[in-house]
């Protein structure tokens, strides 16, 4: 039963990425190369992030919430955005449209994140005999994370690649992108200060991901409509 | 394919929906229930003349269940958990005699029996007699049964009690936990028990020489004091036997200490040699005693005036028995008994003489002194037991724990034996001397006895599982050597029809597990979620026509995507 459980959790964690790739036109335009390149960028970004965290962050003995440290952590979290920026603008993509580019980048990014953060605990934990909900929740979290990343990538493509966007929408775009970029800090805040338990946090993340995806999609469509006119 | 899956799903869902709902509710409540680990002690596994007895397996990996069962339930994949306080021995006997195959059996001993529990260690009956009785019955049953499944003992604690309450709740609702319904899984993974290749028995011998008068060529007579120190119990790792025969060994150590003080001064050195023997192999017809006696120098053996064997002398009833093999009319025995009787009277102990003839052709040796008697050495056994025990019985069972025995009885018995011996040795001084009077420098030392009894009460010492250089044997030898100059250990192989198997203790992991049904449902839910995701993504990005188009394509494509 345990291998079965592992299979289930892995399906929940990594299935949506595969589905996303195959169901959307990404597969038809053969954007796998872009996804892989993004994954490599993610890897490097994660390394840089680790080095920064190790350099600038004090290791606290107790699990207290230090606002200064948290702020620093959030700032280091913005390295992710820089990585996304690099992946989106500096990588040479084969001729794919912007719509597909941001999706491919977001997907590759989220997939690399899932593999790096969730595969090892899953392999070690979910095959154990003891049943916990943790790995199922972790899989749901991976889903939410995919949505967040794709949303952020879409907003990023608006910010960095599109020249003629409506002026009125720019503050909204930046606000949404800011929220998305600070999402890890927000969840960490919820978990540690408000002392929410894991299911509650995951519920919040799912809800937030739906809301943010909706907002991003509206912004993206608004810009697209404007440019197509 | 999706359609078929959907239909299957509906069918399964209708069957399992109720169970799943209940299960998910239960599981949600106990979201973070971590695995519990507890120490377990395996029932002894041995062959007697090639016939297998005890628990024949050690590995355990089954779901847990509790009493009572529905009749006719298949228990071959269930670990039955029974706390001793609720145990009905007759029901267990039925299970064992019916040869029902269980997945395993876990017997929970009351917490008071655990090694960590030190309250009430200073004597006093802290547990009901009925529990003791039940344990004795249970032990007798288990030792002589052949169970083709693992049987373990463990001590109750709060965690396992919680688990047990949970198991009971599940069982009460009619769901026996099997692999289809979640529950608790008990896992013990140990290597398969191996036969103990050669059981070594170590006999420790101490020699306290008496004072020879000048020009006295003839050898001095010898008095032997003997106690068997090893144990036998249902759980080898729990078999501490603080009464049988910890009390006897401690008494021997204390007597050795007292007499060594007397003998250290030439003025008070008696005209008797004293031979101390700590023998092993007691439960197996006193095999160790026999070997020790045979290896003794025959001059020493012939010089033995008499031997006193000490066996279970922590009598709380204030009653001791002197078991003899020679008829009580024998003048020597009469004299010996009178000596003990007089001292016992002064101490307020009731002592009785009991005669049991030896049948030379019978291999069974019920008392240690019978080994001496077979070699024509006068010997008696001092014991609280009035009747000879059966083979493997009364050698440190589960109930024989230090904190239940009566310590003052041990002090009294020590005094009785020491005083009687001293009066025999210093007979010329007159009848009414008191050598080991309380308060004198030669008084019995209660704290010495207590500390040794405490050590015995926490040291399991079944001979086959004691190695040659076991710290316990070394400690005994050292302690004896502290008082007596001539001490040696003699190693022999235990022979006879016994062979034992190892892995006497292990760790039990208790896991809360989800059922296969739950995982099936989860798979189903995930499958539908992914299919839904796929369909909606296709519709949003390419339109409905594309989606329909996909399902018209060859099936290989479908499999890949779903």
Image: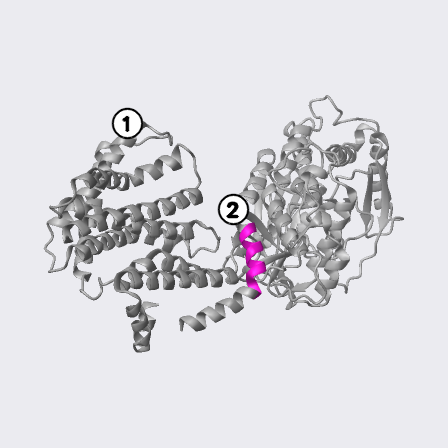
Q: Which image quadrant for residue B66?
A: bottom right
Res. A139 visible in picture: yes
Between the C-alphas of marks 2 and 1, the distance is: 35 Å
Do the numbered discs 2 and 1 sit on residues whose CB atoms are within 8 Å? no
Q: Quadrant of the N terminus of chain B?
A: bottom left
Give the image location of residue B221, x and y in percent: 72, 42
Res. B507 visible in picture: no
Query: Which span of residues is magenta-colored?
Result: B15-26
**Residue located beneath label 1 in the image:** A68
Q: Residue furthest front?
A: A229
Give the image location of residue A15, x and y in percent: 34, 60
Give the image location of residue B159, x and y in percent: 58, 43
Q: What chain letter is assigned to the residue under label 2?
A: B
Q: Residue furthest right?
A: B329
Q: Which image quadrant for residue B404?
A: top right
**Residue located beneath label 2 in the image:** B33
Q: Which image quadrant for residue B270?
A: top right
Dot 1 falls on a residue whose secondary structure is helix
Q: Is residue B45 above or below residue B444?
A: below
User: Is A49 on the left or on the right of B487, as rendered?
Assistant: left
Give the image location of residue B400, x and y in percent: 70, 44
Q: Main secondary structure of the magenta part?
A: helix
Instruction: Check residue B286 for magenta coloring.
Output: no
**B399 or B547, which is in the foreground?**
B547
Instruction: Check residue B24 for magenta coloring.
Output: yes
Q: Quadrant of the C terminus of chain B?
A: bottom left
User: Is B108 on the left or on the right of B335, as rendered?
Assistant: left
């Amino acid at each position: 039963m345990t291998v079965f459980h592992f299979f289930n959790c892995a399906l929940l964690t990594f299935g949506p990425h595969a589905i996303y790739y195959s169901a959307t036109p990404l597969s038809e335009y053969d954007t796998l190369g872009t996804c892989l390149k993004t994954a490599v960028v993610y890897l490097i970004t994660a390394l840089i992030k680790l080095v920064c965290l190790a350099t600038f962050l004090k290791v606290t003995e107790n699990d207290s919430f230090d606002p200064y440290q948290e702020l620093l952590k959030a700032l280091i979290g913005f390295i992710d955005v820089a990585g996304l920026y690099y992946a989106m603008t500096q990588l040479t993509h084969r001729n794919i449209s912007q719509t597909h580019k941001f999706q491919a980048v977001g997907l590759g990014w989220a997939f690399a994140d899932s593999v790096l953060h969730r595969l090892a605990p899953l392999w070690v934990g979910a095959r154990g005999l003891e049943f916990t909900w943790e790995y199922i929740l972790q899989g749901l979290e991976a889903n939410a994370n995919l949505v967040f990343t794709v949303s952020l990538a879409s907003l990023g493509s608006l910010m960095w690649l599109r020249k003629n966007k409506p002026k009125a929408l720019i503050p909204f775009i930046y606000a949404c992108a800011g929220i998305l970029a600070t999402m890890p800090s927000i969840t960490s805040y919820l978990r540690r200060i408000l002392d929410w338990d894991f299911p509650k946090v995951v519920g919040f993340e799912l809800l937030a991901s739906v809301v943010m995806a909706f907002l991003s999609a509206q912004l993206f469509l608004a810009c697209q409509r404007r440019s197509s006119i | 394919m999706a359609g078929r899956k959907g239909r299957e799903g509906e069918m399964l869902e209708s069957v399992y929906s109720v169970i799943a709902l209940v299960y998910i509710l239960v599981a949600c409540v106990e979201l973070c229930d971590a695995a519990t680990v507890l120490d377990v002690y395996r029932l002894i596994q041995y062959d007697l003349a090639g016939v297998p007895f005890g628990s024949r397996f050690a590995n355990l990996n089954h779901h847990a269940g509790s009493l009572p069962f529905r009749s006719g339930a298949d228990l071959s994949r269930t670990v039955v958990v029974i706390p001793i306080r609720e145990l009905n021995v007759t029901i267990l006997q039925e299970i064992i005699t019916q040869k029902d195959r269980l997945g395993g059996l876990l017997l929970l001993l009351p917490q008071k029996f655990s090694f960590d529990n030190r309250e009430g260690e200073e004597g006093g009956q802290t547990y009901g007699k009925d529990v003791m009785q039940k344990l004795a019955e249970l032990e007798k049953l288990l030792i002589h049964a052949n169970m083709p499944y693992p049987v373990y003992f463990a001590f109750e604690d709060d965690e396992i009690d919680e688990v047990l309450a949970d198991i009971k709740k599940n069982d009460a609702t009619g769901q026996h936990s099997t692999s289809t319904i979640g529950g608790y899984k008990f896992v013990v993974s140990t290597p398969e028990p191996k036969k103990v290749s050669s059981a070594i028995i170590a006999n420790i011998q101490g020699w306290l020489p008496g004072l020879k008068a000048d020009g006295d060529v003839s050898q001095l007579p010898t008095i032997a004091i003997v106690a068997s120190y090893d144990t036998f119990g249902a759980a080898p790792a729990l078999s501490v036997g603080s009464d049988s025969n910890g009390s006897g060994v401690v008494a021997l150590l204390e007597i050795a200490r007292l007499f060594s003080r007397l003998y250290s001064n030439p003025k008070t050195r008696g005209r008797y040699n004293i031979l101390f023997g700590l023998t092993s192999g007691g439960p197996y017809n006193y095999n160790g005693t026999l070997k020790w006696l045979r290896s003794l120098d025959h001059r020493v053996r012939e010089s033995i005036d008499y031997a006193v064997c000490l066996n279970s002398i922590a009598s709380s009833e204030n009653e001791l028995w002197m078991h003899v093999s020679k008829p009580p009319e024998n003048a020597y025995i009469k004299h010996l008994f009178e000596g003990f009787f007089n001292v016992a009277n002064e101490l307020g102990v009731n002592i009785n003489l009991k005669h049991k003839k030896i049948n030379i052709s019978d291999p069974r040796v019920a008392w240690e002194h019978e080994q001496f008697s077979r070699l024509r050495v006068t010997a008696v056994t001092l014991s609280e037991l009035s009747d000879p025990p059966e083979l493997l019985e009364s050698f440190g069972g589960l109930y024989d724990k230090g904190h239940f025995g009566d310590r003052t009885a041990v002090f009294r018995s020590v005094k009785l034996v020491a005083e009687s011996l001293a009066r025999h040795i210093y007979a010329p001084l007159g009848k009414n001397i008191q050598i080991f009077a309380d308060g004198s420098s030669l008084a019995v030392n209660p704290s010495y006895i207590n500390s040794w009894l405490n050590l015995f009460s926490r040291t399991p010492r079944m001979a086959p599982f004691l190695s040659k250089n076991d710290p316990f044997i070394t400690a005994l030898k050292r302690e004896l050597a502290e008082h007596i100059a001539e001490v040696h250990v003699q190693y022999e192989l235990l022979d006879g029809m016994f062979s034992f198997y190892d892995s006497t203790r292990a760790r039990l992991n208790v896991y809360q597990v989800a059922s296969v049904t739950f995982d099936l449902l989860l798979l189903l839910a995930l499958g539908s979620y992914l299919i839904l995701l796929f369909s909606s993504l296709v519709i949003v990005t390419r339109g409905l026509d594309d989606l329909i188009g996909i399902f018209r394509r060859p099936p290989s494509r479908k499999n890949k995507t779903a």
